[in-house]
Image (cartoon, grey):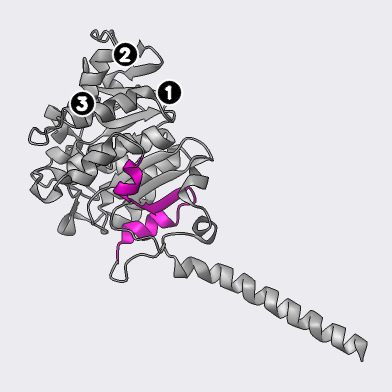
Amino acid sequence: MLMKLQLSLSVILLLACGFLYKFTLKSSCLFPHLPPYKSQQGLEALLGRGRSIVFLETSERMELSPLVSCAVESAAKVYAEQPVLLLMKGLNNSMQLPPNSTSPALSLLSAIDNVFLFPLDMKSLFEDTPLFSWYTQINSSAERYWLHVSSDASRLAFIWKYGGVYMDTDVISIRPIPEDNFLAAQASQFSSNGVFGFLPHHPFLWQCMENFVENYNSDIWGHQGPELMTRILRVWCKLRDFQEVSDLKCLNFSFLHPQRFYPISYVAWRRYYEAWDTEPSFNDSYALHLWNYMNKEGRAVVRGSNTLVENLYRKHCPKSYRDLLQGPESSVTGERGPGNK
């Protein structure tokens, strides 16, 4: 009798283990943007794993463009051992996508092991920074460039708090950035804020946040973004023109040559959408900023066009190229947003 009871208990235990195993697998369907092991990792725990690569979406948009997908995928490919974060204002805290979401880009990115999607809660993010009082008093509906200004503020606060590398969502990564603390020159003696990286609690970013509030003027495009970075950079550094392709050292961070991220300047942004007889090697670049905000003409990335940007997709974000790009009959533009300037 005792043996029968023990046998019955063993069978029940095996069945229970099997059920739990199946439920764990099934949880990847319940949380389609977070594989099972991801759903157990909070943002704070994840950031403890090392320097992260950070992208932001400060609108409520949940349908990501192929360009956003390419930016995130390429970063995940280059930084395969580091977490790549996409913080989205449109995500809620339930870890589930909205029921009406049909974004193929989100499904694609969620399947990449080192890509993590999290809600963007600005009020919480700005706590314990100079930006909190500004954010709680601002009338966002009266702001001309609110999506962009809030993105400028969010990237400063996030990298100050947690460290890592911030990238705009129109930046295609091609090789690792060897610096921990850096700004990216958009042109000689002028800084971008579309790519930058610092260790946590770097005083340069704290000063940027203070200046953000003290000299706030959102009516001037870029005043709270690249112009802010350049203002504080000039306080910290004695700037000079770059010599050849060499970076400048400024106290405990680097000011990287325009070739590192901006080998094609904003005035020539259309060159990305043209076919080249001989394509550039970009041997001196870590990533390429595609200046998507300039693309008011709605130029598209078209499969089979042999343009520079198509070939960049094919090489650096092959999954996005395969699954999201269309042929010339139904081409897709990269929707302009606050994270792609």
As measured in the structure, the alpha-carbon distance from the residue carrying label 1 to the one carrying label 3 is: 21 Å
Instruction: Measure how far apart labels 3 and 2 are at the Cα level.
Output: 25 Å
Task: Find out whether residue 112 is within the magenta segment.
Answer: yes
Type of amino acid at the residue the image marks with label 3:
Leu
Q: Visible in this render: residue 114?
A: yes
Say above or below: 32 vs 145. below
Residue picked out by circle 3: 228
What's under tag 1, amino acid-wise? Glu
Q: Magenta span has 51?
A: no
Q: Nearer the viewer, residue 170 or 46?
A: 46
N-terminal-most mark, 3 or 2: 3
Per the rendered image, the range of residues in magenta is 102-127
**Residue type for callout 2:** Val
The image quarter in which residue 99 lies: bottom left
| 1 or 3: tag closer to the N-terminus | 1
Foreground residue, 173 or 25?
A: 25
**What residue is pinned by disc 2?**
245
Q: In the structure shown, which secondary structural element does the residue marked by tag 2 occupy?
A: loop
In the picture, measured across the screen, residue 205 lies left or right of residue 327, that is: right
- Location of residue 47 in the rendering, given as x and y in whole percent from the top left corner: 48, 42
Residue 200 x %, y % = 43, 31
Q: Earlier in the sequence, mark 2 or mark 1?
A: 1
Check disc 1: other Cα within 10 Å, few if <14, some if 14-19, many if 20+: some
- Mark 1, residue position: 179
